């Protein structure tokens, strides 16, 4: 591969996704060079445009949530309830490699844009469907989102303080996990598409993705009937593996997850006798005596500042870190070195640079999230060859663009 080329530079994607899981997947396809044509509805567009905080310097339909997960895409507005819009989508589907959608099961089929419909038009089409609970089953048609998935998968059940109630994780982990599984499945299908000349349908249930975030707990819960307790800043399977408050009221995270790290921590804390103490010598022993050990560790860490402890633990080669708020985290020396932030567009928008990198291709982020319907006309002209008269007819009929409210 030539330097500075992207690995998916010859791939085209028709993107019917909205909210978070689907756009997260297509964003990374765009980062790797795929041409993404994002379809939005006329009234309101992608729901994330009105979520989060508005960015008035960009436009009335650009929120921080939307611009964060929709970079490197072209934006079209089409009313899929209109036959002409659906026909335009079918024509576009003939020219792409991948279609991704995250409507409720049955919606795309009702519109004539399901996998069975489009694979007839585009042999070898890769079609990825993301749904809440899966295409069939007792819950398949229910509305859902990240917080529902966190609650029904057990993610919230293991999150929270000791003796307290369940808490939602601060990041939409089931949304983004679903997007990453969709990305993985789509790339696998792309790799194998020569073996499947009739096309491939990749299906991702957000529920299944959320369960897979709980993989480490499943054997004990299902085979031993073990209830996974909430342990706050700690870890239910490893001790010590948590944040400790220091003398300056700042936290230090300590991750002594192996025998060697535990022994180094004991020496760094001045308690080498713990290495052979039967209460603490193994992780199962430390789990059984968690309350005793954690109380002593809390007292020790309270004796020095967080900066002092970080220096001590770094010298001892024990995994540790400060506990940052996001605005500090993105400006840490390592984050700056990695170049995690990128400004794109004019006016500039600060987004994350893709974490998927290679020495063999261009790893940069090039274009900001598209404005509402910004590329509708150019896509119709360049991809479908429509002339100005036909485009004006479609616009006048309300097939694309922002429609007037019906009286």
Image (cartoon, rainbow, N blue to C red):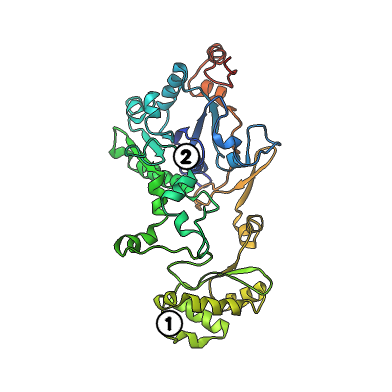
- Residue that numbered label 2 is attached to: 22
Left/right placement of residue 293 relative to residue 250 reads left
Picture layout, residue 87 above or below residue 279: above
Could you tell me which residue is drawn at 29 percent across and 62 percent down? 223
Q: Residue 281: which numbered mark, if any?
A: 1
Picture layout, residue 74 above or below residue 190: above
Q: How many marks?
A: 2
Determine which quarter of the picture holds residue 305.
bottom right
Q: Mark 1 and mark 2 in contact? Answer it, CB < 8 Å.
A: no
Tell me the crowding category of disc 2: few under 14, some 14 to 19, or many 20 or more residues within 10 angstroms, Cα based: many
Could you tell me which residue is drawn at 47 percent across and 33 percent down? 15
Q: Position of residue 106 (x, y in %)?
A: 37, 30
Q: Position of residue 260 (x, y in %)?
A: 46, 78
C-alpha distance separating marks 1 and 2: 46 Å
**Does residue 286 appear anywhere in the picture?**
yes
Determine which quarter of the picture holds residue 338.
bottom right
Looking at the picture, tell me which residue is in the foreground, 88 or 139: 139
Q: Position of residue 148 (x, y in %)?
A: 46, 45
Label 1 or label 2, whichever lies nearer to me, is 1
Could you tell me which residue is drawn at 62 percent across and 73 percent down? 310
Looking at the picture, tell me which residue is in the foreground, 52 or 321: 52
Picture layout, residue 2 above or below residue 35: below
Helix or strand or loop: what does disc 2 sit on? helix
Left/right placement of residue 343 relative to residue 396 reads right
Tell me the crowding category of disc 1: few under 14, some 14 to 19, or many 20 or more residues within 10 angstroms, Cα based: some
Picture layout, residue 320 above or below residue 201: below
**Does residue 6 appear anywhere in the picture?**
no
Determine which quarter of the picture holds residue 200.
top left
Helix or strand or loop: what does disc 1 sit on? loop
Image quarter where the C terminus lies is: top right
């Amino acid at each position: 591969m030539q330097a500075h080329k992207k690995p998916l530079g010859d791939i085209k994607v028709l993107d019917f996704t909205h909210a978070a899981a689907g756009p997260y997947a297509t964003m990374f396809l765009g980062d790797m060079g795929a041409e993404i044509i994002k379809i939005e509805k006329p009234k309101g567009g992608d729901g994330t445009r009105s979520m989060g905080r508005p960015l008035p310097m960009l436009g009335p339909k650009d929120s921080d949530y939307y611009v964060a997960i929709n970079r490197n895409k072209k934006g079209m507005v089409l009313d899929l309830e209109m036959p002409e819009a659906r026909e335009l989508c079918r024509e576009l589907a003939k020219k792409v490699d991948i279609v991704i959608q995250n409507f409720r099961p049955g919606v795309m089929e009702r519109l004539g844009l399901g996998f069975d419909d489009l694979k007839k038009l585009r042999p070898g089409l890769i079609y990825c469907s993301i749904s809440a609970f899966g295409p069939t089953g007792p819950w398949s048609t229910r509305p859902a989102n990240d917080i529902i998935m966190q609650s029904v998968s057990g993610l919230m059940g293991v999150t929270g303080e000791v003796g307290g109630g369940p808490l939602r994780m601060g990041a939409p982990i089931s949304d983004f996990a679903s997007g990453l599984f969709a990305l993985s499945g789509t790339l696998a299908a792309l790799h194998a598409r020569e073996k499947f000349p009739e096309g491939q349908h990749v299906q991702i249930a957000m529920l299944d993705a959320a369960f897979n975030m709980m993989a480490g707990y499943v054997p004990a819960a299902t085979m031993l009937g073990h209830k996974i307790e909430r342990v706050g800043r700690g870890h239910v399977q490893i001790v010590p593996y948590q944040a400790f408050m220091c003398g300056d009221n700042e936290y230090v995270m300590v991750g002594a997850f192996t025998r060697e790290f535990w022994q180094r921590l004991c020496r760094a804390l001045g308690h080498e006798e713990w290495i052979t103490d039967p209460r603490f010598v193994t992780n199962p022993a430390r789990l059984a005596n968690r309350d005793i050990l954690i109380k002593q560790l809390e007292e020790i860490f309270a004796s020095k500042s967080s900066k002092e402890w970080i220096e001590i633990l770094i010298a001892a080669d024990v995994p540790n870190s400060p506990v940052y708020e996001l605005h500090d985290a993105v400006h840490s020396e390592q984050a700056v070195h990695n170049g995690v932030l990128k400004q794109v567009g004019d006016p500039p928008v600060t987004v994350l640079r893709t974490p998927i990198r290679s020495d063999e291709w261009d790893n940069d982020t090039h274009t900001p999230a598209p404005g509402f319907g910004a590329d509708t006309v150019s896509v119709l002209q360049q991809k479908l060859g429509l002339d100005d008269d036909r485009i004006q007819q479609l616009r006048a009929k309300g097939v694309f663009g922002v429609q007037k409210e019906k009286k």
